[in-house]
Amino acid sequence: GAGVSQSPRYKVAKRGQDVALRCDPISGHVSLFWYQQALGQGPEFLTYFQNEAQLDKSGLPSDRFFAERPEGSVSTLKIQRTQQEDSAVYLCASSLGTIPRYEQYFGPGTRLTVT
Amino acid sequence: AQTVTQSQPEMSVQEAETVTLSCTYDTSESDYYLFWYKQPPSRQMILVIRQEAYKQQNATENRFSVNFQKAAKSFSLKISDSQLGDAAMYFCAYRTPGSRGGGADGLTFGKGTHLIIQP
């Protein structure tokens, strides 16, 4: 079956532009996670959805970052007024259930470069 | 806050040999999960192995096994009979249920170990 997909795979934005990153989770997966992976670092948690409810956004670095999952499936991570420090790979993951024993399946990521 | 430390930025091993990747973590929780993820150059993160903290028996998945030392907060990954396809970044990760509310948690990752397989 299809895995987690993300689009675009690569995005170049000029500083100050707004960007929108899309995540299509595995069908039927309840939980959806966004992570930010800076160059040479491990991924860092940004936010978590259970169906359409955003239950945790403690990892969002600033109010320029906004995520939504209005129908409980596709999710969009929006970054307003991009800054150079936003350059990173943004990973999306989904899992079947809400308890930790359910594996998180990761997408290929979107590499964002802010110039 | 939980932290995960991988002290080996890079490791190299000859094909068919065995290599061990180190991971330590810091937590005040008693119930948690530990994972090793593999991230090949294509960047899609893949789960290699998982360990529940309440289980004393070390997890094993084919050529991959862990040495889980709960008291020492250590969780190392052993790869036996290394193959060229094992070359990747390996991340140790930690997760507790519900510490951020709402049930499932995001993962806390280490900085990773770059594993090189010498043919």
Image: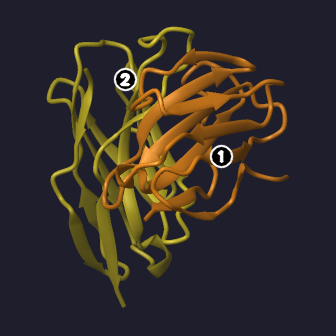
Chain colours: A orange, B yellow
In the displayed structure image, the side of residue B25 where residue B101 appears, left or right: right
Q: Which residue is mark 2?
A: B53
Please state the horizontal and vertical placement of residue B75, each as a whole percent of the image: 27, 40
Front residue of B70/B10: it is B10
Whether residue A72 is situated above or below residue B20 in the rendered picture: above
Residue at 71% over, 56% down = A7
The quadrant where residue B109 appears: top left
Quarter of the figure that contains the C terminus of chain B? bottom left
Distance CA(mark 2)–CA(mark 1): 38 Å
The quadrant where residue A103 appears: top right
Q: Residue furthest front?
A: A16
Quarter of the figure that contains the N terminus of chain B? top left
Q: Residue furthest bottom?
A: B119
**As shown in the figure, which amino acid type bears the numbered disc 1?**
Ala
| SS label for mark 1 | strand
Residue at 72% over, 49% down = A4
